[in-house]
Every structure is written in C-alpha cells, then in structure tokens.
Image (tube, rainbow, N blue to C red):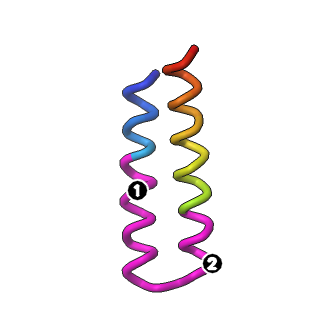
Amino acid sequence: MIATLDARIARAHQRLKEARAKGHPSVIAERERQLDTLLEQRHNLVVE
C-alpha cells in the first residue's frame, strides 16, 4: 500500500515540476493540492 502511494507521490511531484516549468499558476495550484493530499494520505497510513 505504501509503495503504491509512494509511486503516486513521485508521479504527482513530477507533474508539479512540469507545471512549474510551464508557468501556469492555476495548474501549479492544482498539482500542489494533489501532492499535498497524497502526502497527507501517506502520513496517515504511517501514523496508523
């Protein structure tokens, strides 16, 4: 489960880097939100 989540986090981080490179503020904000959500899910899994 954690490995799958780590893979999703890695992909989300890559998409965020790509969005930042293109400089689209709304896309960057959405990618940041998605990454934050995944990181929070991982944290909750580890804490449980």
The Cα–Cα distance between marks 2 and 1, rounded to whole angstroms, is 16 Å
Q: Residue at x 54, y 63 (%)?
A: 31
- Residue 3, by quadrant, is top left
**In the image shown, does 16 or 43 lie closer to the viewer?**
43
Residue 24, given in percent of the width and then of the height, sits at: 53, 84
Residue 1 is covered by the magenta coloring: no
Q: Please, what secondary structure does the residue beneath circle 1 have?
A: helix
| Residue at the image point whose x is 60% and y is 70% from the top | 29
Disc ID at residue 26:
2
Does 20 sit above or below residue 12? below
> Relative to residue 29, is residue 42 drawn left or right?
left
| Disc 2 residue type (three-letter) | Ser
* Res 15 → quadrant: bottom left
Q: Identify the magenta region.
A: 10-31
Q: Are marks 2 and 1 in contact (CB under 8 Å)?
A: no
State the residue at coordinates (51%, 41%). 39
Q: Main secondary structure of the magenta part?
A: helix
Q: Is the residue marked by circle 2 packed among few (<14), some (14-19), or many (20+) residues within 10 Å?
A: few
Q: Is residue 48 left or right of residue 46?
A: right
The residue labelled by disc 1 is 13
